[in-house]
Image (tube, rainbow, N blue to C red):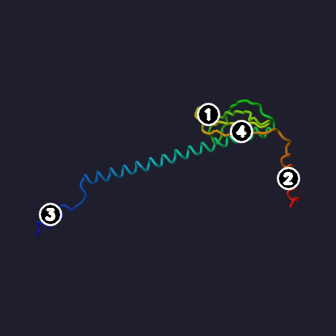
Amino acid sequence: METMIRTHRKHSGGFTLIEVMVAMVVAVLALVAVLAAVSQMVDAGIAMRERTYASWIGQNKITELRLANVEPDVSESNGDVKYAGIEWAWTSRISETGVPGLFRVDVDVSIAGSQDKIRSVTGFIGEPSIPGESNRIWQQAGQAIGESQ
């Protein structure tokens, strides 16, 4: 009876080398998967930030054209701007829409030195107006609505 107890104790003392190696391989594979997921999330965050900045730059260019309050020429122009510590390149194309006095503006934005377009923004510019005229029209329409009630 004593020999059976000793034999039993001999085999229940710990893990074998193969069991330890398999456990380490499983742990390494899990860590690699976690690192790959984190890396992918970081890349997605950077891409989202770049698309957001590029969108803002394109919208700013369209706004600058609107605030100039002049009828734009059908043309193409480009330039560079530093925004959020990054050098950006933009190209704007002004085209006719078929509606008199209404122009379409397409702005493509990329990181300077790259041919890859990050974002395209489209806007429309109407005929120049007298500054404040739209406010006056808005107020008159509001008064007309108030009188009709």
Q: How many marks?
A: 4
Camera-near label (1 vs 4) is: 4
Farthest residue toward the right?
A: 147
Q: Nearer the viewer, mark 3 or mark 1?
A: 1
Element on which disc 1 rests: loop
Image coordinates for residue 70, horizontal then vertical, percent: 81, 36
Label 3 to label 1: alpha-carbon separation: 75 Å
The image shows residue 76 at horizontal and vertical percentages of: 70, 30
For label 4, the residue is: 61
Q: Are marks 2 and 1 in contact (CB under 8 Å)?
A: no
Q: Amino acid at mark 4?
A: Lys
Q: Which residue is mark 2?
A: 141
Q: CA distance from mark 2 to mark 3?
A: 99 Å
How busy is the neighbourhood of tag 3: few (under 14 within 10 Å), some, or many (20 plus)?
A: few
Of label 3 and label 4, which has the lower sequence position? 3
3 and 4 marks in contact (CB < 8 Å): no
Residue 112 tag number: 1
Q: What secondary structure is marked by label 3?
A: helix
